[in-house]
Image: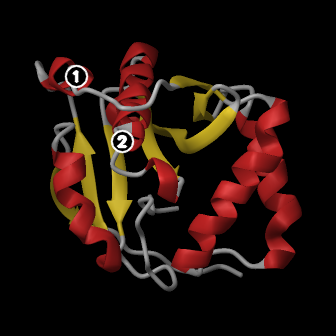
Amino acid sequence: MPCRCCSASAKGDSPGSAITTGSQSGRADELRSWESPVSVEIRPARAEDEARCLELLAVLAGTTGSARPSEQEPIAAAFRSLLDGARGEILVADEDGLLLGMASVSYNIAMRYGGEYCQLEELIVTPEARGKNVGALLVQSTVDRARARGCPEYGLYLLPTTEHNLPFYQKFGFEKIGTELRQRLD
C-alpha cells in the first residue's frame, strides 16, 4: 500500500511515484535539531492504542478513499499482527497519553537486497499536530529503526495527489526513482 501522507486528498489507488532512501550522513542530525513545539514520545504501538490508531487510519482513508467500512475487522487484525514486529511495525507519537500521529512500516524480503527492506505504508498526523514536527519525528524514527534492523533500503510511494509532499520526504534523503504500478485483486 502506498504511503498516503497526513495531508493527502487522493481518491483511489492510482499509481504513484516510488521514493527511496539509503544512508544519508548528516540528515538525521539535521532533522533532530529541529525545534518541536510539542513534547512527544515516539514509541511502538501497544494493544491499547488500537482504537485510536484505527481512528487515525479512518481519517486518512476518508481523504484517500482507500478503505471501506466493511474492512474494519481486517484492518484491526492487521494492526494486531504488526505489534509483534516480525513483518512490520507501527510507531505512534504520544503526547501525555494523546496519540498525535502514527507511522506504519512493512519489512519485505527481496533477493536483490539479500534480505529485508523497509516500506513506509501509512503516515498520519492529526490536523492539530501538523506543522509541529510530529510527522518528521515519526519518519525519522522509522528510518532509524529500519537502519538498526539492517535494512539496506527504505521506500515509500506518493500518489499523484500527494506528490506535493515530495520536499518533506527529500529532507530525509529520499529520492524519486520511478513509478509504481498496482492491480486491485478484490
Give the vertical position of 74 relative to 33 (above or below): below
Colour mode? secondary structure
Q: Which of marks 2 and 1 is nearer the N terminus?
A: 1
| Residue 182 visible in this rendered orientation of the protein | yes
Image x and y of residue 93, in percent: 55, 33
Give the vertical position of 40 relative to 167 (above or below): above
Mark 1: which amino acid? Answer: Ala
Give the vertical position of 95 relative to 184 (above or below): above
**Number of marks drawn:** 2
Secondary element under disc 2, as helix, strand or loop, is loop
In this rendered view, identify the residue nearer to me: 30 or 85. 30
Crowding around mark 2 (Cα neighbors within 10 Å: few <14, some 14 to 19, many 20+) is some
Viewed as shown, does residue 48 lie left or right of 3?
A: right
Image x and y of residue 82, in percent: 71, 37
In this rendered view, identify the residue nearer to me: 26 or 137. 137
Viewed as shown, does residue 12 lie left or right of 141?
A: right
Quadrant of the snapshot with the C terminus: bottom right
Which residue is rendered at x = 31% and y = 27% of the image?
Answer: 152
Which residue is rendered at x = 21% and y = 59% of the image?
Answer: 166
User: Badge 1 is on which residue?
Assistant: 28
CB under 8 Å between callouts 2 and 1? no
Q: Viewer-nearest of labels 2 and 1?
A: 2
Mark 2: which amino acid? Answer: Lys
Which residue is rendered at x = 65% and y = 59% of the image?
Answer: 57
Image x and y of residue 10, in percent: 44, 80
Q: How far apart are marks 2 and 1 (CA)?
A: 17 Å
| Residue 123 visible in this rendered orientation of the protein | no
User: Badge 2 is on which residue?
Assistant: 132
Secondary element under disc 1, as helix, strand or loop, is helix
Q: Which residue lies furthest to the left in this view?
A: 26
In this rendered view, identify the residue nearer to me: 54 or 76. 54
